[in-house]
Image (cartoon, rainbow, N blue to C red):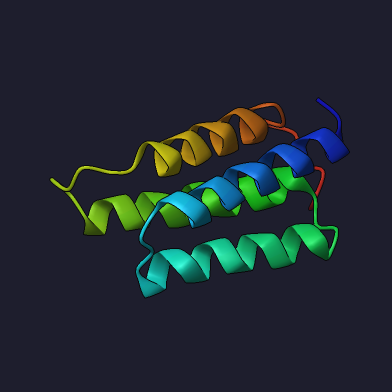
Amino acid sequence: MSKEEDKTKMLDAIKLVHQNVKLDDYLESILVTAVKQLKKDDLPSYVATMLIYRLSYYFMRHVGTKQSEYIDRLYKLANKIASKYKGNFPYL
């Protein structure tokens, strides 16, 4: 996928989460920050890495709670995008 395709897929996944999941304040702030970074034209790999860290923390705070399939899809997409650049950090 190209940078634009990655960006579009992430924005679409975030939109699905926003439409289908009741968001708490922390999760909403994660998504708003990601959208702002993508629209500011940050690299999708950078945004994906930040999403992985922040969503991982969110999951740790909610251990034992069934997570939405939309949040899970977003997390997997972020992992897929970030893993393309494993060992190659173009944003540094």
Q: Is residue 89 visible?
A: no
User: What count of labels does the image hold?
Assistant: 0
In the orientation shown, which residue stands out farthest toward the bottom?
A: 25
Left or right of residue 62, residue 45 in this image = right
Compared to residue 73, the image places residue 19 above or below, namely below
Could you tell me which residue is drawn at 63 percent across and 60 percent down?
Answer: 34
- Looking at this view, is 64 or 11 the one in front? 11
Q: Is residue 86 above or below residue 40?
A: above
Given the current orientation, which residue lies at the most extreme front position? 19
Q: Where residue 56 appears, x then y in whole percent?
A: 38, 49
The residue closer to the viewer here, 73 or 20, is 20
Quadrant where the N terminus sits is top right
Q: Which percent across, then down, holds residue 29?
A: 50, 71
Return the residue found at the far left.
Answer: 64
Residue ID at (79%, 53%): 92
Of residues 57 and 77, the one drawn nearer to the viewer in this rendering? 77
Residue 60: x, y in percent? 25, 53
- Quarter holding residue 22: bottom left
Vertical side of 68 occupied by 18: above or below: below
> Is 69 left, or right, of 75 in this rendering?
left
Residue in the image at 64% along x and 36% along y? 82
Q: Position of residue 5 (x, y in %)?
A: 81, 34
- Does the rendering let one see residue 26? yes
